[in-house]
Image: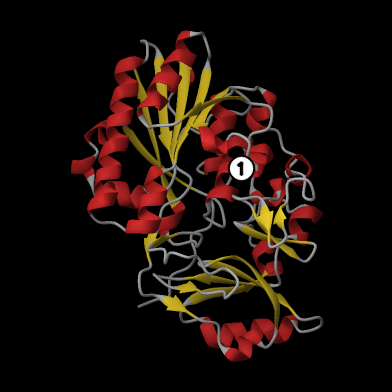
Amino acid sequence: MDDPEPMLPAFGGNCITDLVPALLGVTAPPQSLLDEAVLDSYATVMLVLDGLGWNQLQQRPHLAPTLMSMKQRSATTVAPSTTATALTSLVTGTPPGRHGVVGYRINVDGEVLNTLRWSTPSGDARKRIVPGEFQPEAAFFGQRPVVVQNAEFLHSGFTMAHLADVRHRGWQTMPAIAVQVRQAVASGEPFVYAYYDGIDKTAHLRGFGEFYDAELAACDKLVADLMTALPRGTAIVVTADHGLVDCQGAATAFAPEVSAQVRSRSGEARFRWLHAEPGRQADLFAAAAAAHSDRAWVHTAEEMIDEGWFGPEVTDAARSRLGDVAVVAKDRWYFTDPVDNPRIELIGRHGSLTPDEMLIPVLTFTS
C-alpha cells in the first residue's frame, strides 16, 4: 500500500479558520460550509463540541439522530490538530502561523509552556508570559459576543489568550448551556458562542466504548434542547476543534540515536517537536527520519512552513516557538517524552494530521 500523506489544513474556504469570519460578516461566506439561510438568520449560535471528529460522528449515526438531522458538511482543523491551537484559530479566524499558539506545549525562551494550564515547570506563567501579548489577535474580530463555557475556565491563562474581551457566561453542568444560550438570544444577542469539552475528556480517559457513546448521546440531546428552546429564525452551527484516534498500546520511544541529538522537546505525543543541540539540526533530522519514518511524518520546520502547514504566513514570534524537526505520528502511534508523562495513560489522542483527527463536522440548522 502507498504511504499516506498528511492531511493539510484547507485554509481559505474549507477550514475551521473560515467559519467565524463568515458568520460575523467579516469575509465572504465559504459556500462549501454555510448556507444563505444561516447567514441571514435572526441570531446564530455556534456550539463547539471539543473532540467531535467528523469520522467518529459518521460511524455512530444511531447515537446522534439530532446531529445527523442537521445539514452535514465537513471541514479541516489546523496543524497541529490540538485544542489550544484549533480554538484560537477558530475564534480569531487566523492560522497558527499568525496567532502563534502553535501547539499544546510550546517552547518559550527555553521553557516549555503548557498552553491549556498556562504553566511551565516553574509554575503559573500568567505574569511571566502574558497571555494577551503572547496571542495578539482579537477574538471574534473585536465584536465581543457572549461566550458560554465551563465556569472553571473563565480566568485561565488560555482563556485570557484566546477569548480576551468577550462577555463570559459560565456553566457548571451541561443542561445550563442551553439555558445560558437561550437567555442570551432572548436578550437580543445576534451571535452566541458555546463550548463543551465532555467528548474530548471522555475519549482521552475512556476511549471509544460505552462511555464515549453515552457522551455523544448526551451532546445530541443538548443540541435537541437548543433547537426547542431557541426562537424561530435562529441558526445553530455545531462544529469541533479536532477528532481523535484510539492510541491504546501504541506508545513509541525515540531511538537513542535521535535522543542524542536533542536538546529539548515540545509539542505533544502525536506531534512532537524536537529541538536540536546547537549545530546538530541536520544530524537530528537525518537520525529521526531514519529511525521513525515508518511510524511518523518527519519534517524540518522549514519544510512545513514552505508547504503551508501553519498557514500562508508565519510570524517571527510563531517561528521562534517551533522546533527544528517535527515527528508527526501516523496511524495509531504516539511518541513518549519523559518530562510529559501524564498520571493517567490517555487512550484517545490527537495532534497529528490523519483524517480521523483533521476532519471536523460543520452541521447547520435554521428554525
Q: Badge 1 local density, few (<14 within 10 Å), some, or many (20+)? A: many
Q: Give percent across and percent down for residue 30.
A: 51, 34
**Coloured how?**
secondary structure
Q: How many dots with numbers?
A: 1
Q: Nearer the viewer, residue 129 or 63?
A: 129
Is 256 drawn above or below residue 323 in the view shown? Answer: below
The residue type indicated by label 1 comes to: Thr
In which quadrant of the rendered image does the N terminus lie? Answer: bottom left
Is 65 drawn above or below residue 269 in the view shown? Answer: above
Say which quarter of the image contains residue 120. Answer: bottom right
Q: Mark 1 points at which residue?
A: 88
Which residue: 39% across, 12% down? 233
In which quadrant of the rendered image does the C terminus lie? Answer: top left
Q: Give percent across and percent down for residue 95.
A: 64, 47
Which residue: 50% across, 32% down? 149
Q: Which of 164 and 358 is in front in this view?
A: 164
Q: Give percent across and percent down for residue 112.
A: 69, 63
Is 83 drawn above or below residue 64 in the view shown? Answer: below
Q: Is mark 1 on a helix, strand or loop?
A: helix
Q: Give percent across and percent down for residue 235.
A: 41, 20
The answer to whether residue 92 is seen in the rendering is yes
Residue most toward the left? Answer: 62
The answer to whether residue 37 is seen in the rendering is no
